[in-house]
Amino acid sequence: MNIQWFPGHMAKTRRLIGENLKLVDLVVELLDARAPLSSRNPDIDAICGQKPRLLILNKSDLADPTENEKWLAYFRTRGLSAILFDSVHSKSTKQVTDTVRGLLTEQLKRQEERGMKNRALKLMIVGIPNVGKSSFINRLAGRSAAISGDRPGVTKGKQWIKLSGGLELLDTPGVLWPKFEDEAVGLRLAFSGAIKDEIMDTETLGAKLVEALCERAPEALMARYKLESLDFENGFYGLEAIAKKRGFIVSKGEYDILRAAQIVLDEFRSAKIGRITLESVEGEDI
């Protein structure tokens, strides 16, 4: 699949991040815990440079718990601060604020020496589309402070949001990078919903996801769709088997492959198939 999506607002967001970087003390970069490397925008490193950074492995409730811990260790051994987070149920908001203050200890000390005890710490929230930035902010704020949705591209412009505890957050729209050098990266992002479904071939994407799940979570796939075997030639035959089990039939007895593809994508994204991580620290990627 040729997965490329870089509309004009993406370039505008890159400029917005660069122009506002000087206004913030720390960058909070949200990743999708189901694909921590694939959801890291390489442009963020180039734009943010040496600005203090905190990685949030968001949607951790949808990812494999064992893999979550491995990815935390992976980033931390590389000198990066990282936290697991679940914007729907997480109670670890205090861990976020405590970690931010820990990363900015020296800066806070300098401010105190200058008599600036009550100056708010300013954070910029960045990440790819549909990684849950607005939901993350709302969880920290304890209210609906940022516009959120389950589709990429909901946040349109920058928003400053004040929190208790002396924090101010700058929300930014999700941003991808101009070209995916590795098709597998583009597929993982498409599976997770970071790329708008409207520009994708849903049947092909669903077939690719079935193939990925055969590798990453075969038992969960079989259990969810009551499949006796995964011994099919490719993902399209897998979708046909799922359509047969679910009774998805169109005219003249043909199986509704499109509906099966939509179901598999929706149920992967909602973790109904199981808590599945698409890439592993050991490099056993799809």
Image (spheres, rainbow, N blue to C red):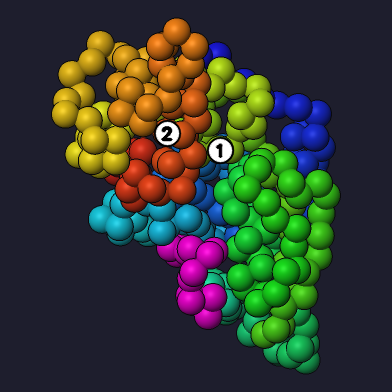
Element type at marker 1?
loop
Range covered by the magenta-colored residues: 78-95
Among the two numbered marks 2 and 1 on one chain, the one whose residue lies closer to the N terminus: 1
Quadrant containing the C terminus in the rendered view: top left
Instruction: Kindly identify which residue carries mark 1.
Output: 193
Q: Is residue 91 magenta?
A: yes
> Which marked residue is nearer to the observer: mark 2 or mark 1?
2
Q: Which mark is residue 26?
A: none
Tag 2 and tag 1, C-beta contact below 8 Å: no
Element type at marker 2?
helix
User: Is residue 27 visible to us here?
Assistant: no
Q: Position of residue 157 (x, y in %)?
A: 83, 49
Few, some or many residues within 10 Å of mark 1 (<14, 14–19, 20+): some
Q: How many marks?
A: 2
Q: Is residue 212 left or right of residue 91?
A: left
Which residue shows up at 72% across the image and 69% down it? 144
* Label 2, label 1: how far apart the Cα atoms are: 13 Å
Q: Which mark is residue 264?
A: 2
Few, some or many residues within 10 Å of mark 2 (<14, 14–19, 20+): many
Q: Position of residue 264 (x, y in %)?
A: 42, 33
Looking at the rendered structure, the kind of residue marked 2 is Val
Q: Position of residue 57 (x, y in %)?
A: 47, 56
Which residue shows up at 22% across the image and 30% down it? 227
Which residue shows up at 61% across the image and 70% down it? 139
User: Is residue 169 visible to us here?
Assistant: yes
Looking at the rendered structure, the kind of residue marked 1 is Gly
Q: Quadrant of residue 136?
A: bottom right
Q: Nearer the viewer, residue 17 or 162?
A: 162
In the displayed image of the protein, which residue is found farthest to the top?
Answer: 252
30 to 261, vertically: above or below: below
Q: Is residue 225 magenta?
A: no
Q: Is residue 132 left or right of residue 157?
A: left
